[in-house]
């Protein structure tokens, strides 16, 4: 059952893109700029897990559920802090400046993180083996192979999406976030602490990136400082595809992109163009439906 | 404004370049190579400046145009240059460079037109996407060597060609922008909607900027190909585009002289920093961040009457 | 002000050129009276392929240190000047120009990637400086000219070795090929494998590509599985190969997978773990068939570099430097032309990676070994002689 297997492959890949895209879309929704450094937080999350895993193995035993949860939790927390720090140091001073300035700064931050981590004294450029956090099982249903890791990713992405949706729609913080994304000045006038909400957004976005990084590494246990670049770009395309600023859109975009890439990857003669698929989709979407699949078209006011 | 000395300046510059070039056999190859690199980067930076700086279209795919120009020019010289007589070589070279530039200009058209509706971040990502797509196309094209790329390209780029091209690029861009027609670029940069209301067609200016910028990037690509004698698709990736973008930012977007100086500094800096080669890229990244935080108008900004800043 | 701007910029341009160009007048090396032999090395120490460049560099460094500790060669010590090309295209020509024209190198060692070797080779050739590539396998590298050498075998040889291995030893009639379309090494090896395999009577049932650095291969592997091959050839690097083998097992593709020397690294086992069990690859040497020299090399490398086991790149880097020293000794001179002649005349050089002789194309003629991964270790299977 070739195509069912490919479907499963695509869904698994897509859910990781979805997870990363959620972070991009949250930051864009609130701040209206693309956080290029998001992809590198993904990488930092994976490395954080790499270093924490041996410690957790001592407490909880290797490859245990609790150990895995602890690792994910701590790594996410660390990355949330890093994200907040980046925002504080590099983006907050530029809040009043033109968007281009912040965009370039984001590129600078991304490059900085990548090159510092490539340095021998930090992580080194060599690929490292990501530790096994949970024992892997192969599930075979009607000839279709699914790895337990993939299943976990699928389920957890759904759960996290729901949790995020809940936070944004049903909590006070979430309401403040939505207010901020509609109109920053009005929100500030209504008593929303802009700085706090933005830090909160970055924190959550970065935590999501860290989790995505760990899942990504579970599927492909080779981590290196540049591992975030490709998935980051793809996830950004996914976010745009779904409608940037729109949470379910990001998830949908991720899944769709994952599926498209998988289909292309499995076709001889097209598989070598896989890199370009994401960008081709991006260009097509921006040409024909710039608000994305689920977004709303806004009229630009003079 | 009328430039009394401009044409004379251009011809003088080209003449000096040709004369200096005659003595090139006596120059140290390493330094000469670096000098030619400087000239090529000047062409790239000034051409990008037209798109990014003057017209305000933030393009992150300039390396793609460079790739197109380089590959086309190289392919032509590989096919025709081997068999032509020595006296015909400069002619073949010139034709190849221009051909490369023209095809790159067409690519610029292809990129410029869809990008019309996009602003800021989106435009940046789309141009990045185009740059990557161009790279992927070359990577998979056997005619252009695919992953191995093209090699054995005749080494025809000299100080004369490169500095001549730089002089011409600067001349064209500066004259263009300072002409009555060219004021339109700045108008589109400051406020597109107002410009449109005043009868300046933003579409036409944006596309023109892309086409001209791409043309010169293509010529630069051709010069690059005939200097390094090999071309690989990975040499024209996102990082290369960023390199050029940083030159434009450092120099101050919309400031030709500043951009030229920035190109010179950023080409020579890595050579000077070879002692701390380990930390070179880290310093580079910090430079970008510091620039944006402390002096976003670039190091050598020229005060221009600003319109509504966004 | 505007007028001044333009003329200013024009003069700025030419002042800079003049300064740069004239500052380099005269030939380098006049000041090299210290009695050292300057050898230039260029490698990708940072950037995407930093691991390979660093490995090769470490091997070369070890060799130079050993030579100097033993008193140098022809009475002089070797001064190794290493430049990083950051895995950037276009950098190699600049740094090799610097090594030759500014630092006065009499010979150049480098590079691992064929594309970067191809960039530097014309410069070495036209300057009359011999260049030894440790690991570039594209045949075109040495075709540049008679000053360009390599110490590794080339793609046509390795491709044929694996093709015959697949047909005769694995008894595979139907093979799928998964190529790294971003890597010229991978494409070259795949091409020669396909030629060799079809010539031996086999059938290539599926051909798919991936981009080096990708982490998801299930799409390609599922299609390959559907084509029912007896074995899968993956001519890529170990980082991708390990992931490919893991994911193949995950979707139930359980046929033998095999590759070339790009697989060789202990990281292959570290990352791939049990998924690597039972697969094969060809490479340059294995301790079991290695000479006492190669065993000594492994020990020395471990001692020098914190217990790391050397991979193929390190061994080849070591060999390139040792071969150069050997050639200088035979030529009894540090003059580039004489070194070149001595290199070309190499017959039976006892390299760590096997007995080497230079053929008329200046490619190393040496044997390949085929290894299998059994019990989590590389086990030796057989040697294929050229």
Image: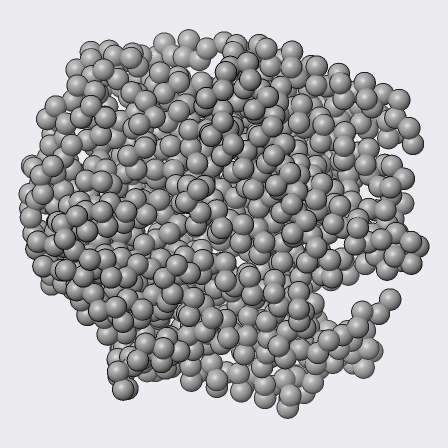
Counting from the top left corner in percent of width and height, residue B298 is at 73, 42
Q: Position of residue A183 (x, y in %)?
A: 78, 76
**Residue under the image location 20 percent in, 17 percent down:** C342
| Residue A297 locus on image (x, y percent) | 73, 76
User: How many numbered discs, if any?
Assistant: 0
Residue for point 87% across, 41% down? B181
Using the image as rendered, state which of residue A18 and residue C307 is in the foreground.
A18
Is C320 positioned to the left or the right of C286 in the image? Answer: right
Quarter of the image where the C terminus of chain A is located = bottom right
Horizontal relation, residue B230 to residue A98: left or right: left
Q: How is the image coloured?
A: one colour
Residue C267 drawn above or below residue B281: below
- Closer to the camera in the image, C52 or A301: A301
Given residues A164 and A3, the one toward you in this image is A3
Quadrant of the rendered image containing residue B168: top right
Q: Is residue C124 visible?
A: yes
Using the rendered view, name the quadrant where residue B249 is placed: top right
In the rendered image, residue C151, in percent from the top left (x then y), is placed at 22, 32
Residue A27 image-quadrant placement = bottom right
Q: Residue at x 51, y 49 (%)?
A: B135
Residue A268 is left or right of residue C259, and the answer is right
Position of the N terminus of chain A, as image quadrant, is: bottom left
């Amino acid at each position: 059952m070739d195509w069912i297997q490919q479907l499963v492959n695509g869904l698994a890949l897509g859910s990781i893109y979805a997870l990363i895209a959620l972070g991009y879309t949250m930051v864009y929704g609130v701040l209206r700029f693309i956080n290029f450094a998001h992809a590198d937080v993904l990488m930092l999350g994976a490395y954080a897990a790499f270093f924490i895993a041996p410690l957790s193995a001592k407490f909880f035993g290797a490859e245990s559920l609790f150990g895995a949860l602890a690792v994910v939790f701590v790594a996410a927390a660390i990355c949330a802090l890093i994200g907040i720090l980046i925002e504080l140091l590099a983006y907050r001073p530029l809040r009043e400046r033109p968007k281009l300035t912040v965009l370039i700064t984001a590129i600078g931050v991304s490059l900085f993180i990548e090159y510092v981590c490539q340095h021998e004294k930090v992580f080194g450029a060599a690929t490292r083996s990501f530790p096994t956090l949970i024992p892997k099982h192969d599930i075979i249903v009607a000839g279709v192979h699914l790895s337990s890791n993939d299943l976990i990713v699928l389920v957890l992405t759904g759960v996290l999406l729901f949790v995020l949706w809940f936070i944004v729609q049903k909590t006070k913080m979430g309401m403040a976030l939505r207010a901020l994304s509609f109109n920053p000045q009005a929100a500030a006038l209504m008593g929303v602490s802009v700085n706090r909400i933005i830090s909160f957004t970055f924190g959550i976005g970065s935590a999501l990136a860290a989790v995505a990084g760990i899942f990504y590494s579970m599927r492909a246990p080779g981590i290196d400082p540049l591992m975030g670049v490709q998935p980051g770009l793809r996830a950004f395309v996914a976010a745009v595809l779904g409608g940037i600023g729109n949470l379910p859109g990001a998830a949908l975009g991720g899944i769709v992109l994952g599926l498209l890439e998988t289909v292309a990857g499995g076709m001889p003669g097209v598989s070598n163009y896989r890199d370009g698929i994401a960008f081709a989709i991006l260009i097509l979407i921006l040409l024909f439906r710039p608000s994305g699949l689920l977004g709303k078209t806004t009229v630009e006011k003079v | 404004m009328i430039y009394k000395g401009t044409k004379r300046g251009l011809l003088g510059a080209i003449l000096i370049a040709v004369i200096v070039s005659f003595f090139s056999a006596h120059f140290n190859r390493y330094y000469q190579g670096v000098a030619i690199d400087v000239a090529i980067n000047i062409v790239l930076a000034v051409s990008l400046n037209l798109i990014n700086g003057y017209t305000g279209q933030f393009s992150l795919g300039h390396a793609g145009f460079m790739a197109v120009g380089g590959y086309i020019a190289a392919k032509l010289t590989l096919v025709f240059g081997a068999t032509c007589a020595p006296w015909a070589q400069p002619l073949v070279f010139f034709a190849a460079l221009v051909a490369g530039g023209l095809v790159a200009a067409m690519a610029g058209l292809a990129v410029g037109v869809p990008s019309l509706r996009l602003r800021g971040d989106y435009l940046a990502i789309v141009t990045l996407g185009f740059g990557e797509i161009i790279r992927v196309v070359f990577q998979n094209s056997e005619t252009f060597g695919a992953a191995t790329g093209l090699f054995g390209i005749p080494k025809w780029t000299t100080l004369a060609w490169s500095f001549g091209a730089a002089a011409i690029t600067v001349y064209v861009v500066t004259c263009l922008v300072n002409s009555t027609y060219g004021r339109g670029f700045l108008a589109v940069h400051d406020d597109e909607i107002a410009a449109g209301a005043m009868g300046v067609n933003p579409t036409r200016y944006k596309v023109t900027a892309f086409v001209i910028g791409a043309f010169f990037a293509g010529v630069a690509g051709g010069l690059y190909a005939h200097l390094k004698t090999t071309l690989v698709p990975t040499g024209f990736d996102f990082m290369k585009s960023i390199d050029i973008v940083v030159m434009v930012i450092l120099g101050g977007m919309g400031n030709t002289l500043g951009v030229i100086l920035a190109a010179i500094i950023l080409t020579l800096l890595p050579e000077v920093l070879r002692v701390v080669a380990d930390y070179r890229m880290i310093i580079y990244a910090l430079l970008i961040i510091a620039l944006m935080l402390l002096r976003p108008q670039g190091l050598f900004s020229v005060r221009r009457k600003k319109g509504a800043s966004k | 002000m505007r007028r001044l701007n333009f003329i200013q910029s024009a003069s700025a341009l030419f002042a800079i050129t003049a300064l740069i160009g004239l500052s380099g007048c005269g030939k380098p090396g006049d000041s090299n009276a210290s009695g050292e032999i300057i050898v230039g090395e260029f490698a990708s120490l940072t950037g995407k392929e930093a691991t390979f460049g660093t490995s090769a560099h470490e091997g070369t460094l070890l060799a130079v240190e050993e030579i100097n500790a033993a008193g140098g060669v022809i009475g002089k010590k070797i001064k190794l000047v290493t430049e990083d090309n950051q895995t950037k295209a276009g950098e190699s020509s600049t740094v090799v120009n610097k090594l030759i024209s500014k630092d006065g190198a009499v010979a150049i060692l480098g590079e691992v990637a064929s594309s970067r070797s191809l960039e530097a080779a014309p410069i070495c050739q036209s300057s009359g400086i011999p260049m030894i590539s440790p690991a570039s396998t594209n045949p075109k590298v040495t075709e540049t000219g008679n000053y360009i050498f390599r110490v590794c075998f080339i793609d046509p040889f390795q491709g044929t070795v694996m093709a015959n291995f697949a047909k005769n030893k694995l008894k595979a009639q139907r093979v799928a090929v998964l190529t790294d379309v971003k890597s010229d090494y991978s494409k070259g090896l795949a091409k020669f494998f396909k030629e060799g395999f079809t010539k031996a009577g086999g059938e290539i049932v599926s051909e798919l590509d991936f981009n080096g650095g990708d982490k998801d291969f299930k799409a390609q592997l599922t299609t390959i599985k559907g084509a029912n091959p007896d074995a899968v050839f993956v001519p890529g690097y170990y980082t991708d190969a390990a992931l490919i083998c893991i994911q193949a097992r995950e979707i139930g593709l359980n046929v033998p997978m095999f590759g070339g020397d790009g697989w060789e690294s202990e990281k292959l086992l570290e990352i791939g773990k049990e998924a690597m069990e039972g697969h094969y690859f060809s490479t340059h040497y294995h301790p079991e068939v290695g000479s006492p020299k190669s065993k000594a090399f492994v020990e020395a490398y471990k001692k020098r570099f914190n217990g790391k086991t050397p991979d193929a790149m390190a061994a080849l880097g070591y060999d390139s430097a040792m071969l150069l020293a050997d050639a200088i000794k035979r030529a009894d001179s540090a003059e580039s032309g004489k070194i070149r002649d001595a290199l070309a005349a190499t017959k039976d050089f006892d390299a760590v990676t096997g007995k080497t002789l230079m053929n008329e194309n200046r490619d190393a003629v040496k044997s390949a070994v085929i290894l299998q991964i059994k019990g989590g270790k590389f086990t030796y299977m057989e040697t294929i002689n050229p």
